[in-house]
Amino acid sequence: MPTRFAAALIAGLLVIPAPASAQSYPTQPIRIIVPTPPGGVADLLARAIAQGISANTGKTVIAEQRTGAGGVIAADFVAKAPPDGHTIYMGFHPTQSILVHLQKLPYDPAKDFAPIILVGSSPNTLVINPKLPVKTPKELVEYARKNPGKISFGSPGNGSSGHMVGEQFKLLHKIDIVHVPYKGAGPAVQDLVAGHIQMMFDILPLTRQQMEAGTVRALGVMSPQRLALAPDLPTMAEQGMPELEGGPWFGLLAPAKTPRPVIDWLNAETRKAMAEQGLRKKLESLGLVLPLGSPEDFGKHIASETVRWGDVIKRAGIKLK
């Protein structure tokens, strides 16, 4: 009798269904938490993904803003959400790779998230006020060396991608240029045009109009290849500065311990959503690069960026003010 009972028990265990989160996911609407206000790149990408997955699968996916504290509020909310794949995060460079070196965070960027997919990046562009008598990045370096402390570079704020790249540029070439933080890229670009600052590193979509009007001059783009949006603009690598590559990036993350089948489903469905030709063309026309690799690729990217910016922050002695 015990033997027959054991056999029946084993047989019953074999037919117990897998956890609902892995087998029948999603069982409720998926929320993509966005750390920045409506209209920005993170919001644009999140809404495109939500619409694409909803259209392709019939499942409900929505983008939801939770702004504040430089993205920390949104990141912490998702880090502490149930690891079932129904609340995911449109993470970006500050919350996952930069702020950890500048302040105490209520979450651990490396341990509290499971990477899903690196969705998009927007390479920074070195732009200057056209009254500055230089035409190339090397000429800018030479001018800065001859005029220490007289060139200022603006950024959207302390700890932003534009700030980090400016500090990296300063360290690489051992030049004395002064950082001026702003509350957003818009005011910084306005002061660049007015000549109150002389240079900045910013994404192409935000300075393209001024470039075409001749009110700013672009010297190079921080991408592996030239961008279709500005085919005549050489990369920094072409001009002897291969270290200066990158810019703001955005990717989906889930709470740690989210089941791998759920991560794989989200990765695959995001890739399908972003494969729509009209959408890709629109995003690429804005100067966005769409990597769309594996979860492992994204994890390596975050780790690399964390080391890179940690080194710059330490060497430059950067502190949040």
Image: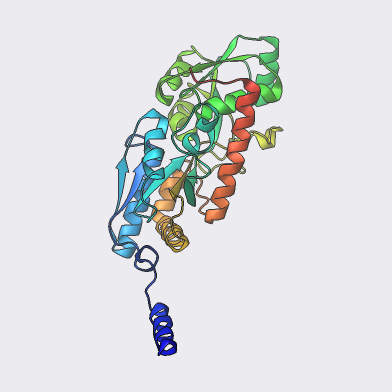
> In the picture shown, does residue 80 fall above or below 216?
below
Q: Nearer the viewer, residue 169 or 196?
A: 169
Q: Quadrant of the N terminus?
A: bottom left
Residue 223 visible: no
Residue depicted at 68% across the width and 17% down the height: 175
Image quarter of residue 268: bottom left
Percent from the top left, x then y, of residue 320? 50, 20
Q: Position of residue 183 (x, y in %)?
A: 41, 21
Q: Which x, y percent locates residue 288?
A: 48, 43
Q: Quadrant of residue 304?
A: top right
Colour setting: rainbow
Decide if residue 254 is on the left or right side of residue 169. Answer: left
Q: Residue at x 48, y 11 (%)?
A: 196
- Residue 151 locus on image (x, y percent): 59, 13
Total marks placed:
0
Looking at the image, is 16 positioned above or below residue 310?
below
**Could one spot residue 268 in this view of the protein?**
yes
Relative to the observer, which residue lies in front, 157 or 229? 157
